[in-house]
Image (cartoon, rainbow, N blue to C red):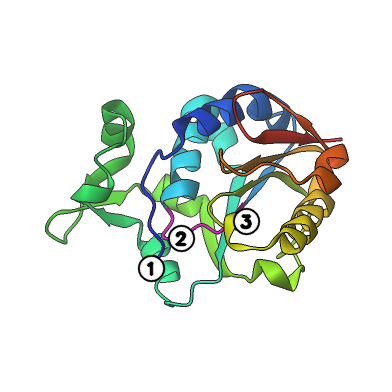
């Protein structure tokens, strides 16, 4: 089973908050695709960041589509329940944890509030199908997935991302994953210290 944790790669989340969010919040709706979402820690971390910075009224217009090939067939239930064991939530900043989590009925588990859970929808999806689950995303996040593909596959998937973004939309990738030179002309780097790019 894929492993990650809440607020992993906080630097990238902060770049999204500081650079992508001002642009995205000018739109009527913010549509986000988290490709390779695992058990939901990443899309939920982003959701909490957005809620903190958008305010309740506008946050209701945020839709995060979380997808994964999910060969375990477990992710959908985990994400829809939004309940996680104590060891997985220990890195969450205390003020954010207190604002969005409460103890669950299951001993040792903590449950996200309904507002955050409603912002994230799970769908099974194979990136190598090269067919996006939908289009017109303002932001696409892809972590810990492209490194499992060969270079040709990575290029094709990134081109799919490009075609799936709105004009001026953003792509955020793993810190260690550079854009292949064949697709660098499609995106403009946002900062020098994070793999966040704006569609040209």
Q: Residue at x 55, y 33 (%)?
A: 57
Q: Earlier in the sequence, mark 1 or mark 2?
A: 1
Towards the viewer: 67 or 154: 154
Question: Which residue is found at the position 52% from the left and 50% from the top?
Answer: 119
Mark closer to the observer (3, 1): 3
Q: Is residue 47 magenta?
A: no
Q: Percent position (x, y) of residue 85?
A: 22, 54
| Residue matched to label 1 | 1
Between marks 1 and 2 in the image, the one whose residue lies nearer the viewer: 1
Res 112 seen here: yes
Looking at the rendering, which quadrant does residue 17 occupy? top right
What residue is disc 2 on?
A: 38
Observer able to see residue 35: no
Whole-percent x and y of residue 42?
46, 47
Q: Is disc 1 in contact with disc 2, using a CB cutoff of under 8 Å?
A: yes
Q: For the point 60% across and 24% down, which residue is it? A: 193
Q: CA distance from mark 1 to mark 2?
A: 8 Å
- Callout 1 environment at 10 Å: few (<14), some (14 to 19), or many (20+)? few
| Residue ranking furthest to the left | 107
Start and end of the magenta stretch?
34-40
Residue under label 3: 146
In x, y percent, where is residue 22? 67, 24
Q: First in sequence, mark 3 or 1: give its number.
A: 1
- For label 1, the SS is loop
192 relative position to 120: left or right: right
Number of numbered callouts drawn:
3
Judged from the image, the secondary structure of the residue bearing numbered disc 3 is helix
State the residue in front, 90 or 114.
Answer: 90
Q: Is residue 24 above or below residue 2?
A: above
């Amino acid at each position: 089973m894929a492993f990650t944790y809440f607020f992993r790669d906080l630097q990238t989340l902060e770049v999204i908050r500081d650079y992508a969010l001002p642009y995205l919040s000018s739109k009527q709706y913010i549509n986000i695709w988290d490709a390779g979402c695992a058990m939901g820690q990443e899309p939920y971390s982003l959701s909490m960041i957005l809620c903190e910075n958008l305010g309740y009224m506008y946050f209701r217009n945020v839709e995060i589509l979380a997808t994964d090939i999910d060969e375990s067939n477990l992710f959908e239930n985990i994400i829809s329940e939004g309940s996680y064991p104590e060891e997985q939530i220990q890195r969450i900043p205390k003020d954010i944890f207190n604002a969005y989590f409460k103890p669950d009925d299951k001993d040792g588990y903590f449950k996200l509030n309904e507002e955050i859970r409603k912002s994230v929808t799970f769908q099974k999806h194979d990136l190598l199908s090269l067919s996006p689950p939908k289009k017109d995303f303002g932001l696409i996040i892809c972590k810990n997935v492209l490194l499992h593909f060969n270079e040709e596959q990575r290029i094709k998937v990134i081109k799919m991302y490009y075609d799936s973004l709105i004009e001026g939309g953003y792509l955020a990738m793993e810190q260690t994953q550079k854009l292949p030179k064949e697709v660098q002309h499609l995106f403009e780097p946002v900062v020098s210290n994070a793999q966040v790019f704006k569609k040209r």
